[in-house]
Amino acid sequence: MLPKPGKFETGISLTIMLLLVVIAAGILWRQADFNPAVEVFQPQHQAERLSLVAADRKASEVDLVVLPGEISPLGVPETFGPRQLADKIDGKAPLYLSAGFEKLTSQRFSLKNQAGQWFEFYAYRMRDQQGAFAVFSAQRRPDARPDGITRQSYQTANAQFVVHGHYYLELIASQATEPLSSAMRQAALEFVKSHEVKTESVDPGALFPPSGLDRGSITLLAEDAFGFAGLDQVMTAIYHLDGKEVMAFVSKRKDAREAEALAAAYRVFLKRFGGEDVSGKKQSLPAGHMVRIMEAFELVFSIGPYLAGVHEAPEASLALTLGRRLAARIQEKEPGHDPR
């Protein structure tokens, strides 16, 4: 589940959207000139296309995963590097690249004697586990059902998503059927079993206090969090406090000096866009800063190497309550450091 855009981000987005109106109009005009080649990718043509690929399959090629006889590979695995990624996944490429994408291997599989029932397996190798979780969390589906394959994995009606160390797996089915769901789960389990990783997925919510936490909302923003260039690798989570949603965030930096400097730079950024520092008017954390911007409150502080705070709280009291809990949780990990 993606984090809800705030008022600040919405204001910036509206300006950009106005600039896209002319482009959108041009696209609509071009779409009126229909290209019949598009029909090749319609669902009714996929079964025929895939059967031809299977007929040309080379037995010497190594499959992405080895599966039982009732699940057959359709063609050989394809590999894409950073330069070719956009050719495979179109507009999604920037998300993966910003999160440390290294290589994608994909392959299609079908269920024997069940026409039209196939799925495509995408195995993304990222630079590290954080990158894998970043793309996993940014694309979390609203109908996610945790399935226990790894600490971070879930299934939907027609898809399977898994973080396994520095691998991010997507399995997308042609139809929403139970046999395909079962086959995708089997394929994901086989991949996890056959691809050892140095460290299994850690708990991304370890730094967030558990009370009121919506664990399904935890997201890693790989770059430019909250519209601020340079604020990267930020973990966010939604809390439900007094019937309202409030977002907490935390980012581990190189050291305490970097965390403190980045917190100060973010406060300057907020004030540049009309934010008012109300730290002296509101009871705040020791050395923490509260900024009011667009009828919401931002709480920003650092503890040791961690930059942390509360984003767009509807009330200052909620920002302070959650900020204190977050600071206490981080201090458990970094004893001896005070909020700054």
Image (spheres, rainbow, N blue to C red):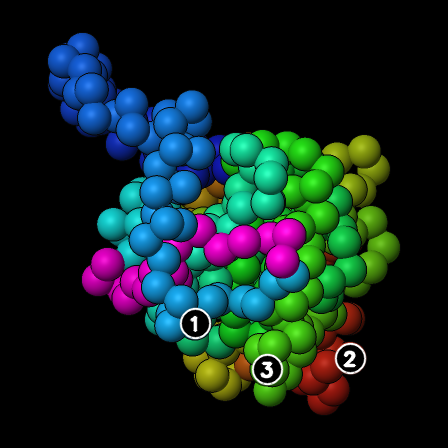
* Residue 235 - label: none
Numbered disc 1: secondary structure: loop
Can residue 274 be seen here?
A: no
| Quarter of the image that includes the N terminus | top right
Nearer to the camera, 165 or 236: 165
Magenta-highlighted residues: 69-84
Of labels 3 and 2, earlier in sequence is 3
Q: Position of residue 318 (x, y in %)?
A: 74, 45
Contact flag, marks 1 and 3 (Cβ < 8 Å): no
- Name the residue at 66% across, 75% down: 193
Q: Position of residue 198 (x, y in %)?
A: 60, 87
- Name the residue at 65% across, 42% down: 180
Q: CA distance from mark 1 to mark 3?
A: 20 Å
Residue 14 falls in which quadrant of the image?
top left
Contact flag, marks 3 and 2 (Cβ < 8 Å): no
Q: Is residue 249 above or below residue 23?
A: below
Numbered disc 3: secondary structure: loop
Q: CA distance from mark 1 to mark 2?
A: 47 Å
* Residue 332 - label: 2
Q: Which residue is mark 3?
A: 197
Q: Which residue is mark 1?
A: 62
Residue type at mark 3 is Val
Q: Position of residue 282 (x, y in %)?
A: 66, 50
Q: Is residue 318 magenta?
A: no
